[in-house]
Amino acid sequence: MDDILIRREGRAGRITLNRPAALNALTYAMCLEIDRALITWAGDAEVALVLIDAAGDRAFCAGGDIAEMYATGTRGDHAYGRRFWADEYRMNARIAEYGKPVVSFLQGFTMGGGVGLGCHGSHRIVGESAQVAMPECGIGLVPDVGGSYLLATAPGHLGEYLGTTGARMGPADAILAGFADRFVPEADWPALKARLVAGGDAGAVAAAAREAPAGRLAALRPEIDALFAGASLGDIVHALEAAGTPFAAGALEAIRRAAPLSAACTVEMVRRLRGRATMRAALALEYRFTFRSMGQADFLEGIRAAIIDKDRSPRWRHRGPDAVPAGDVEGMLAPLGADELKFGKD
């Protein structure tokens, strides 16, 4: 069975992730296939829009397939992961900058690499099962694939909260935070896809949209904005400790499960990008971290604890979220010189 189905259908270029048993996790090969298709369709007058969806009902895409990254990284080969990330990020940028409508249908889990694929297009549709999140801090990375761009442009301090805790967003919350545009009941998706394919008019999305079921973030905004306003991760942790509310306790518990260096860098990235964020600037900043993540951060240990040994007891480099020196954050996000992420001209 092909991992991905790429074809032209009617007026649409269609991309369907086809690994439902693996929650449609993106492999390196899938990223390259998607990018090649986007390049081809950009110059094809018969393709009016691109439609991205996924097989199964559990996930649009739960993230990137990181098994090979771990295998190569533990052998001391960091080049494979760096190539994967660089090519994936260039694909993410292509989606964000695409000259034709890109319509994505996001059911179930849309996390990590799934956000990079599904949450940068022009028409991002969520259904009632949507669970959108950027949980990378839990495995020793930072919100990447352009996730830092979305977090930096989210209202108030939602970006710091979502990035450091990995909190999941239902459909209304994903729309509020800027990860999605429209709610369309999943029962209506087949008919909407048929209209998009037949007519090539992305305006059909707005006509099919409905009001999303109530979320939770809107009511929490005042507390989030107050508690996540600190200049550093340590400041946020101290504010959460002092607050003593059920929300603060839950957020603090989530942050303490994350890799401290990753969470501290996430706060810094959101702060650097806020008010001046571009997709390419965000991806370049993310790449500085991921380029160094195997040798100077907690990525390999995070994958070991969560995926390989599954002991859920990672041994992070820093003892806690309030014990990350500013110099360590600066070091992870410092320019890479000749290794800085480069974008092609396609």
Image (cartoon, rainbow, N blue to C red):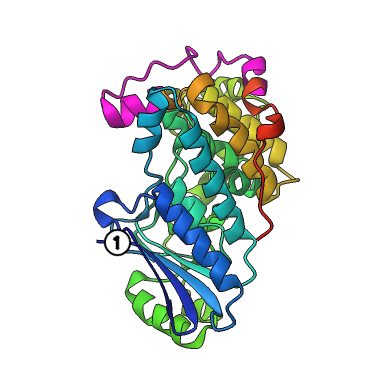
Amino acid carrying mark 1 in the image: Asp
Circle 1: is it few (<14), some (14-19), or many (20+) Cα within 10 Å? few
Please tell me how many numbered marks the rendered image carries.
1
Quickly name the residue at label 1. 2
- In the image, 167 versus 119, the foreground residue is 119
- In the image, 226 versus 307, the foreground residue is 307
* Residue 145 screen position, x and y as percent: 54, 46
- Judged from this view, the residue extending furthest toward the bottom is 199
* Residue 334 screen position, x and y as percent: 69, 26
The kind of secondary structure element at disc 1 is loop
Q: Quadrant of the N terminus?
A: bottom left
> Image point 60% across, 58% down: which residue?
94
**One can see residue 173 in this view:** no
* Residue 30 screen position, x and y as percent: 41, 55
Identify the image quadrant of residue 264. top right
State whether residue 141 is above or below residue 188: above
Side of 15 where 21 appears, left or right: left
> Image point 44% across, 38% down: which residue?
135
- Judged from this view, the residue extending furthest toward the right is 276
> Image point 35% across, 70% down: which residue?
186
- Magenta-drawn segment: 301-330
* Residue 211 screen position, x and y as percent: 47, 69
Q: Quadrant of the C terminus?
A: bottom right
Identify the image quadrant of residue 144. top right
- In the image, 12 versus 311, the foreground residue is 12
Side of 338 where 30 appears, left or right: left
Q: Is residue 59 magenta?
A: no
> Image point 49% across, 15% down: which residue?
320
Q: Is residue 317 magenta?
A: yes
**One can see residue 340 in this view:** yes
- In the image, 118 versus 271, the foreground residue is 118
